[in-house]
Amino acid sequence: MPAAAVYPGYFALITHEDTGVITVADLSTDPPRETLAYDCGPGTGPSIPVISQDRSRVLVGLAGSGEVLVLNLTGESLKRVCEIPVGGRPTGIAISPDSAIALVGNSQIPSVAVLNLSEPFCRPNYLQTGQVSPMAVGITPDGRYGLIAAGSTEGTLTVVSLDGPEPAVQYTIPVGASPRALAVDPTGRHVIVPLAGERKPFYVTVIDISTEPFSVEAKVPVGDLPPGNPLISPDGRFGFVPLTGSYEVAVIDLFNGTPSLAGTVVTGRNPGSVAFLPDSSVALVTTSGASSLIEISLPGLQVTDQDILPYFAPYGIALFTRTGSHVPFIKPLQPFEVEVGKLLSFSLEVADVDGDTLTTVAMDMPQGAVLNGTLFSWVPLMNQTGRYTPVFTVNDGVFSSRHTVDICVVGNGPDGMDIPPPPVVPGM
């Protein structure tokens, strides 16, 4: 096994469902140094933690008490703000990009709680979906739509407009039996919805959200054990889906043509949830059966480290950086198609809330392409038809983010015949 890496400045917020505690693991050490941050109490069953984009709040569903715990995140410390009663068993939570509202799924009541995070002590509003068990929720990266997966034998994904003064249901998409979780692509291309009701094999439904109305793109078989809590890598290439009760995580290729199973990664007993470094180079997976944190390198999908954690049965995980040092951001770009001999030009939108000086570099650039600051330009030649995936990295001197852009060159090859783009192998 390759030598383990350390990640200075990064921390993992980890919930422990069985014991009811929340810990913070310092990823700058190997093994990570884990300390108790907050004790929710026995029987509370804390869910996967969700950190607001402005890093002012942490929300955790407490299935045992029917509440959402609101915490302040200061440095590496958590401080209780309040508990908001929502009823039933709160499960999935999604926070809008502007950190203004949150959606809270529920496995016991047929409605989703809508929380105004500017007023954490207020009573929640409720959104009726017309389906049972609206457990899974998400919000698109542009903040325009909420997504709710619900139902039993005929499960649906409900698309909710968040543009108006109140959330409003727009339409529903059939996804398959018993959706229990979902993950939204940070680049705005896909949503993946694991299904617990279609068995041997179990499936994950992949939905295209790059164009409206949203629609099902594929149903990907992932094996004979039920898929659990998914997450999509920041660059949108891979969907990781822990397989409940197994020793494996299924990995879905979301980048190379029709979504398909890229393979499975052996982790440890009962993988729980996933987190990614912002540059999509590493995935971290909790395993409650082995009380460990598994490190998987991307795009090679190789286990590079396994650390036993001192606190029993880690479940949910979310990454953050210390206060005063945020990760820089590259706004995701949709795929480009360009004809031979035509100019392709686009600007990368990069930002850092700390105001740090940013450096942008490119890898895997097509021959003849130029990156001038954040401006990409290229005129592909006749012999350059095909698909290209340049990788752009922005760095603030401490942290970095990475984004891959998909470019397809079409037109006539040197023999005058139209040449279709070749497939791209993930990671190349």
Image (spheres, rainbow, N blue to C red):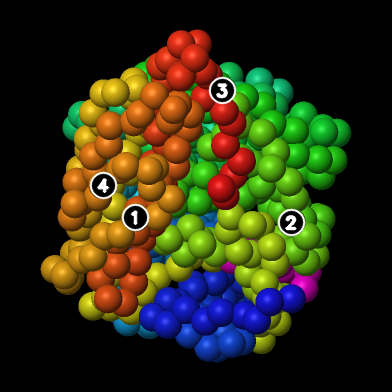
Q: Quadrant of the N terminus?
A: bottom right
Q: Which residue, given by chain and number where applicable, does mark 4 sit on? A: 370
* x 58%, y 58%: residue: 298
Q: Which residues are magenta?
A: 284-290
Placement of 253 over or under 419, stated as above or below: below
- The first of marks 3 and 4 along the sequence is 3
The answer to which of 2 and 286 lies nearer the viewer is 2
Q: Under tag 3, what secondary structure? A: strand
Q: Secondary structure at mark 2?
A: strand
Give the residue type at disc 2: Val
Q: Identify the mark nearer the N-term, 2 or 1.
A: 2
- Residue holding disc 1: 362
Measured from the top left, where is residue 428 in percent x and y?
Answer: 56, 48
Q: Earlier in the sequence, mark 3 or mark 2?
A: 3
Q: Which is more foreground, mark 2 or mark 1?
A: 1
Query: Would residue 269 appear left or right of 352 to someone viewing this image?
Result: right
Q: Position of residue 72 (x, y in %)?
A: 32, 72
Type of amino acid under label 4:
Val
Closer to the eye: label 3 or 4: 4
Q: For the residues marked 2 and 1, what is the alpha-carbon distance in whole angstroms?
A: 29 Å
Label 4 CA crowd tier, 10 Å (few <14, some 14–19, many 20+): some
Pointer 2 residue? 265
Tell whether 105 sits left or right of 206.
left
| Spatial separation of the CA atoms under disc 3 and disc 4 | 34 Å
Q: Is residue 365 left or right of residue 303?
A: left
Secondary structure under the numbered disc 1 in the rendered image: strand
> Residue 301 appears in which quarter of the rendering?
bottom right
Amino acid, disc 1:
Ala
Which of disc 3 and disc 1 is earlier in sequence? 3
Is label 2 in contact with label 1 (beta carbons under 8 Å)?
no
**Residue under circle 3?**
217
